[in-house]
């Protein structure tokens, strides 16, 4: 499998943190799923990290995973993303995390960087939406909004929480298309699991994701991990976002849209390497 690093990541030799916090001996990774997913998406990455001694938290956003909310009832992105905001707000003042977002989870990561920059040591976007101010223009929605999967046919099951004459409020890729579009390179047992657990995503809430420029978001270093065989977040979409808001580093995985299933060891290695090289943390002697 290909792991391509396009920009060298700087190594910090200082033991202190320039933003006045104390680095952890083992970082705390916070993992955020994409639309329709849940904390369960990260089970392989969580297992690898915890077996190596790292602290890991996997978040269920509203209407995802085991959260009881219904996607058609969510009309605000801030409401949808509230579980992540609550989690970060509850962290000790001096603690920093490495925040990782997949797919539409990139919007959640960006809002967190706007509101909790001091608590985020590194933001990592995995085949994720990376827009500094969210969906501020029609062009943003057109190119980085709900994925254009029209080449595969009529693939979405849509929900109309505001009425049949209004725009859809939720969407879910139909089961017969899920493996072909989202998990083509992933093990069959993982795509089967996903087929059982995927829930409708609140697209009306996601479309409302807009953030105010406040200068805080630029204080958080960012890394982008591209996925070279992605049918959801197309290569040209990923490249456009990278050029528009360049991160500190860009890597590439020879993966489908779900590298936590198709290339979990390589994704795990990239995340740990990024944390190490960006900040010079001591990650030696992982737990067995």
Image (tube, grey):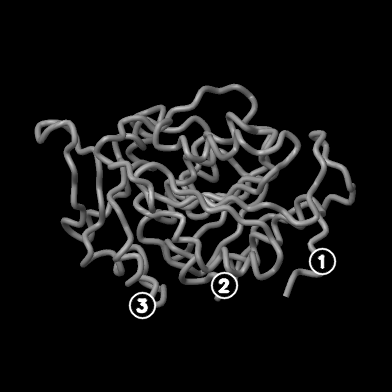
Q: Which residue is mark 1?
A: 284
Q: Nearer the viewer, residue 26 or 15?
A: 26
Dot 3 crowding, Cα within 10 Å, few <14, some 14–19, many 20+: some
- Ranked by sequence position, the earlier of labels 1 and 2 is 2
Question: Which residue is under mark 3?
Answer: 188
User: Which residue reaches farthest left?
Assistant: 165
Which of the marked residues, 1 or 3, is nearer the chain's N terminus?
3
The residue drawn where x is 16% and y is 38% is 160
Residue 246 location, x and y as percent?
Answer: 60, 42
Coordinates of residue 39 in the picture (x, y in percent): 46, 55
Helix, strand or loop for disc 3: helix
Q: CA distance from mark 1 to mark 3?
A: 34 Å
The answer to whether residue 245 is left or right of residue 35 is right
Left or right, 57 with respect to 210, comes to right
Which residue shows up at 35% across the image and 63% down it? 182
Q: Please tell me which of labels 3 and 2 falls first in the chain.
A: 2
The residue that appears at 18% across and 52% down in the rendered structure is 157
How would you rate the neighbour count of disc 2 (Cα within 10 Å): few for under 14, some for 14-19, many for 20 or more?
few
The residue at which mark 2 appears reads as 2
Q: Nearer the viewer, mark 1 or mark 2?
A: 1
């Amino acid at each position: 499998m290909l792991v391509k690093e396009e920009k060298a990541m700087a190594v910090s030799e200082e033991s202190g943190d320039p933003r006045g916090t104390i680095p952890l001996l083992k970082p705390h990774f916070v993992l955020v799923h994409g639309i329709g997913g849940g904390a369960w998406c990260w089970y392989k990455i969580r297992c690898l990290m915890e077996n190596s001694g790292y602290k890991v938290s996997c978040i269920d956003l509203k209407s995802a995973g085991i959260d009881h909310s219904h996607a058609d009832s969510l009309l605000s992105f801030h409401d949808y993303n509230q579980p992540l905001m609550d989690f970060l707000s509850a962290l000790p003042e001096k603690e920093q995390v490495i925040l990782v977002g997949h797919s539409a989870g990139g919007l959640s990561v960006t809002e967190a960087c706007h509101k909790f920059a001091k608590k985020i040591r590194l933001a990592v976007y995995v085949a994720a939406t990376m827009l500094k101010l969210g969906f501020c223009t029609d062009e943003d929605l057109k190119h980085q909004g709900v994925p254009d999967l029209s080449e595969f046919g009529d693939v979405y099951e849509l929900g109309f929480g505001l009425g049949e004459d209004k725009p859809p409020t939720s969407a879910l890729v139909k089961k017969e298309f899920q493996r072909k579009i989202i998990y083509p390179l992933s093990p069959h047992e993982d795509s089967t699991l996903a087929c059982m657990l995927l829930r409708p995503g609140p697209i009306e809430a996601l479309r409302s994701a807009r953030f105010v420029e406040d200068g805080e978001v630029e204080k958080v270093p960012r890394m982008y991990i591209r996925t070279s065989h992605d049918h959801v977040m197309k290569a040209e979409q990923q490249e456009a976002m990278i050029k528009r808001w360049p991160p500190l580093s860009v890597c590439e995985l020879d993966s489908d849209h779900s590298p936590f299933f198709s290339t979990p060891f390589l994704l795990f290695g990239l995340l740990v390497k990024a944390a190490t090289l960006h900040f010079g943390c001591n990650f030696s002697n992982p737990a067995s």
